[in-house]
Structure formats: structure tokens, C-alpha cells
Image (cartoon, grey):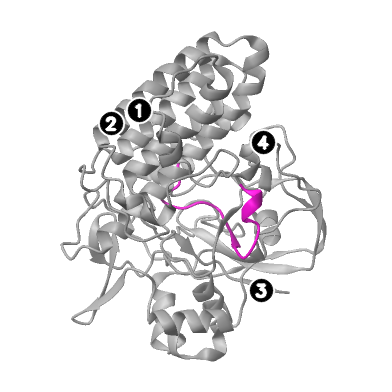
Amino acid sequence: MTATVPASNALAACPSDRGELLACFLGVRAETDRLTAPLSDEDQIVQSMPDASPAKWHRAHVTWFFETFVLGRFVPGYAAFHPHYTFLFNSYYDAVGERHPRPQRGMLTRPAAADIAAYRSHVDDAMQDFIASARTSVWQDAAPLIVLGLHHEQQHQELILMDILHMFSQNSLNPAYQTWRAAPARKAPPLAWIDYPGGVREAGHAGGTFAFDNEGPNHDVLFRPYRLASRLVTNGEWLEFIEDGGYRRPEFWLADGWATATGEGWEAPLYWQQVDGAWLAMSLSGRQQINFQAPVCHVSYYEADAYARWAGKRLPTEAEWECAAAGLPVEGNFVGSGLLRTAPASGSDAGVPEQMFGDVWEWTQSAYSAYPGFRPVDGAVGEYNGKFMSNQMVLRGGACVTPDGHVRATYRNFFYPHMRWLFGGVRLADDR
């Protein structure tokens, strides 16, 4: 499995060149179709929990975005594919209007998957015509929204894989989304520590290329000297935490985390199972033996924080993580590798943190909130990020299901601290 959109794509620059943007549009849209092609119509209907969505709904929602915010706004007389789709496939945009309840998306057996394919084709044709023929004055307003829509679709490509894995994990047949692919057979290098100085540094996106609004404004941050682990925490290291009673020792847990872990009966990361003494985990290639050299995945913020306390360390702040990542090449184990699971670090770059990009989203200790001077953009798209700046935690770096070329050092992902179905993992930090 190879991503159809290369890492060095024009999406990063918010291009004004129509041909370049059209190629990006067609590539991203084709990638969504490729990712959902292995799924049956039945696979695309199921919603395994309220936080997940059916694949069919994802395919329709990202199409709704272009129809609502580009075609419906900039194309006079545009005829919507279906008048009720605005209600069915709106996610959370209150300014657009009412919507189908999120926990009940799995009830939408109609429209059928074939109808969604026709919807996508209808909107794709209209978008191609618009990109080719829009007046220059209109294009200047529309192009940034098209780029935003493409990055938005890439986010949903990742969600599709997250939600498929969770759905398949509920099935005792342990179905596989794709066949097993061999990862590099290597041992994780010993964990080392990389020192960073204190002082005032810049953080946040400085402009000039595409970024989501929550990545800015660029601002100064005061750092104290700190250290960052050279690689991610491995499954083998996490097993030591389990065997030392980490899930049974309240001294390592935040109060909310302990209440959640005990209430939910957590004893290991999501998808881990012990069968006849062997540890197995559900993956997008079915249930497999755990590679103890690979980074641990599918742990919540609460678990990540508890592990860090058990190890005598802490989680990094998002500013510390970004400072360490600034200037590093955005390369790693993304969806284009075809693995769709974590892989061991190589230990090839002494003095440089490995796996900063790809493999897992790295939990930070930073609450998701606005940077100094942040203002959401005007209109409905201003609801994209800002309205969620409460009670969530920031993750950085991308994962093995993240599209190649989608993230950057300033990228801020965010989830509630109890959530585990995302591809979330741990990098330790410490004070100097």
C-alpha cells in the first residue's frame, strides 16, 4: 500500500496555480477511495462507538465540505446533489444548521454506499469545473478553502483507519483490513537522553505556508533546560509497567485517570490480549503477536502520564516537543510505508531524537488551548478548531496512519485524555 499523494505536495504552500491544486485535489480524493476500497458495503455502515463514524459517513462528510464551503458559496446556481445531505453529513458546524446526531451515524443504512460514490463523483466533477473556470477575484477567496478542505479530508483518511480498526476489534473473527507486511527486523536502541537549553524560543506557525488556525500565531515561549528521550517508549517497556502493577497502583495516576482506568477495567493498552501466556494485539492486519521492540500504541493520556510517573520522568510540553522537532526532516513511518502499525527505532542518528514524526501521535502534558493572540477566522470554518479548546490534550508528530506530507513541527492534534482508539504513544521528558 503506497500513498498516492507524495510528501512534497503542493498542499503545503496553499497554491494559487490551478493546475497544481487540481492535481492535489484529485490525488487526495483518490486516496480516500483507495483507503476504503478494501471495505465491503456492510463494513462501511457500522459505527462501533459514539466517537467513531462509519466509513461511508466519512466519505460523504468530506464531500459535503467542498459542496458547502466552496461550490455552494462560489458557484451561482449550483445544484446540490441531494437537499437533505446538508443535514446528514454536517459534523459540528452550528452556523450551517442542524445535523444528524453523531452517536446515531451508524443508523444511516441509506443513502447506500453506491449513492455516496455518486455524490463524490458529482462534487468532484463540479469542483474540477470550478477550479478550471472560476474568475480570478473569486479564485483568490476560494483557493485557501479548497486547500483547507484537502487537509481536512486527509484528517478523515486517518480517522477512517482508526475507526476501521476499532470496528474490526469488536469482531471475534479478527478480520484484517490488509494483509500482514513485514516490518524492519531490528532491536530498539537503548534509550538515551538529548539535552536542550533554557531560554526564550519561538513556537507556533510563522506563516508563509499552509497551517491550521490553531497552529498560530507565532509567539515567544520561555524554556527551562530539559531533556527529551531519544526514541518512543516500546511495547516491551510498557510490559514492564504492566508486570510491576502499573495499572493497579494509584500513586502513579491522576485522580480522573485512576477513576477511568478502574471504572473501565484497563489492564493493558487498547487491543492488547493475553492468550495462553502470549501477548497479542489487534491490528489492521488482524490479531498479531506484539512486537516488543516497536513503540507502544493505543494508550490514553492518563496511561501515558501514569507510565511517565512510574518511570520517574514526565511527558514533554508541546513547546518542548516543537522546539526539539523544529528543523528536523518530516520523515517517518506514515501511511505511505504500508505497514499501518508502529516499527522499531533504528538508532542511526546519535544526538537526534528518532521517531519524532510518524509511528504514533505523542501525548504532551499541554492542555489544548489558544496561543496568545489567537482569533478564529470569520464564518462557519472558524468552528474548525477554536471551539474545541477545552478539556483536551495536545499530541504531536503524526502516526503510522497519518497521510504522508500532512503534518509539520507546529501541527497540533488534540483528543480527550481518556481516548485510546487513536494511534497515541509516549515519549518521555525530564528536567535538567
Amino acid of disc 3: Asp
Q: Would residue 89 be found to the left or right of residue 130 on screen?
A: left
Q: Amino acid at mark 2?
A: Asp
Residue 15 is drawn in which quadrant?
Answer: top right
**Do residues under tags 1 and 2 come within 8 Å of each other at their CB atoms?**
yes
**Along the viewing direction, whichever of 181 and 257 lies nearer the viewer:** 257
86 shown above or below 109:
above
From the image, tell me which residue sits under label 2. 115
Proximity of marks 2 and 4: CB atoms separated by less than 8 Å: no
Q: CA distance from mark 3 to mark 4?
A: 42 Å
Q: Which residue is mark 3?
A: 430
Q: Are marks 4 and 1 in contact (CB under 8 Å)?
A: no
Residue bounds of the magenta highlight: 385-403
In the rendered view, tell whether residue 202 sits above or below residue 279.
above
Which residue is label 1 attached to?
A: 119
Q: Which residue matches tag 4?
A: 379
Tell me which label, 1 or 3, sits earlier in the chain.
Answer: 1
